Image: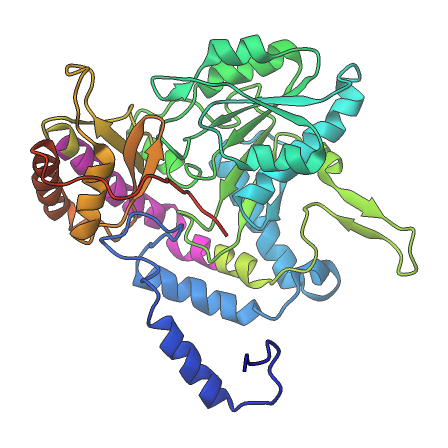
Amino acid sequence: MTPPHFPSNSRPWTDVRSEMTSSHEEDKPWYSPRQFKGGSYFGGEDVVQVANEAYQMYINHNALFAPDLFPSLVKYERELLDALLEMLTAPEGAGGSVTSGGTESIVVAVKAAKAWARDHKPDAAAPEIVVPHAAHPAFDKATHILGIKTVRVPTSVDFRADLQAMANAINENTILIAGSAPSYPYGVNDPISDIGALAEKHNLWCHVDACHGGFVLPFARKLGYPIPDYDFAVNGVTSISVDVHKLGYANKGVSGLLLRDEALVEYQRFTFDDWPSGLYSTRSNTGSRSGGGIASAWAVLNYLGEEGYLQIVERILNTRDRFIDGINAIEGLRVYGTPHAYLVAFGPDTRHQPSTDLDIFAVHDGMLDKGWNSNRIVDPEGIHLFFDNSHHDIAEQYLTDLALVTAEVRSGNIARRRTQTTYTRS
């Protein structure tokens, strides 16, 4: 007989916990030196402890009602946003809001652009947005929800946005243009200064997706790395999304949607009062949300400070550069583009060997057999890595295995097993 889906009887917590513990044993670690995927970011055991303890303090607090009940959460959110705005060189009078993650930040930015266009682009009868080939699918999710159109240009140039193709795609219906700093697939910044200039020329909302780079690029620049302008230093940039739960090391889910002008918040706001309980007005799409994420973000920000973030970013970028040099030194492989943050993609080196038959997905599967867990990309085919504070001591071991596996694939001893490449499916 099939057991009922809804439990009929109460059970002691000891029994429930025992079952959960047993089930949890089948899960992979949420971070590992041998894992380069999974959407989890490790800043150190001390940072994890700070994030978790702060989260626990506010896990039952509903941040929706913070203005009336929890002034400490209002303080944390305001100070967090002020820090993010300063980090991304926002001008006086800038503003923003906290969201549940990068996807929501992008969705809310597109929603705001659509509302803004009613006042500033009244001739855009059928609104469209123009995004690069490698832009995050959250842009397409946003336009799907909002009933507008995404024009995703079909190519990248040197793994960056194809600026000419984006310019050619702009028409009277275009309301927003976007770029990434960096893009997830390649880890390379789009030419944000040029994209911002396009936005100014055509009177468009310009969004920068810095969800992956927001907590790396500012510190990389301070460390002396050549980082092209990508934030509010670019005059045409209207809004920026930056995830605090990535390399800001807050617990999931905390992101910031930052605006050049606080007045633009009204375009993202949802307000309703035609029901018995009075005014309902929110800046983001979420209603009830745990205060734990905001508390976690504020706590880690103050625990690490600029000093701590600089130390971690320096360590990560040192690791990244060791990997890049090692990958490029292996015959038949090359890193795609010039990564600006902590994301790296690599594949067959066809620049000097156009007819190379190296199957990079076979290399991926061979590395998986050796315990290295990473993602894949499909255009061009490649292996995708992200680096956090757990990968510093394993570069030589990874590169040694990569050279061995690549040689085995080239000799025909390893073949690919899987053909479907998936970023996520839930």
Q: Does the magenta stretch mainly form a helix, a strand or a loop?
A: helix
> Residue at 52% of width from left, 35% of height from top?
137
| Quadrant position of residue 197 | top right
* 399 or 244: nearer the viewer: 399
Q: What stretch is highlighted in magenta?
A: 299-326
**Dividing the image into 4 quarters, which one contains the N terminus?**
bottom right
> Residue at 65% of width from left, 25% of height from top?
149
Q: Can residue 109 be seen in this view?
A: no
Lateral position of residue 244 relative to residue 127, left or right: left
| Quadrant position of residue 47 | bottom left
* 47 or 169: nearer the viewer: 169
Residue 375: percent from the left, percent from the top?
32, 43
How are the colours assigned in the image? rainbow
Q: How many labels does the image show?
A: 0
Q: Is residue 113 magenta?
A: no
Lateral position of residue 37 relative to residue 144, left or right: left
Lateral position of residue 266 relative to residue 228, left or right: right
* 418 or 304: nearer the viewer: 418
Lateral position of residue 270 relative to residue 400, left or right: right
Residue 369: percent from the left, percent from the top?
18, 51
Q: Is residue 307 magenta?
A: yes
Residue 25: percent from the left, percent from the top?
33, 72
| In the depicted structure, whether residue 154 falls above or below residue 185 | above
Q: Can residue 310 be seen in this view?
A: yes
Query: Looking at the image, which residue sits at the far front?
Result: 1
Residue 385: percent from the left, percent from the top?
29, 41
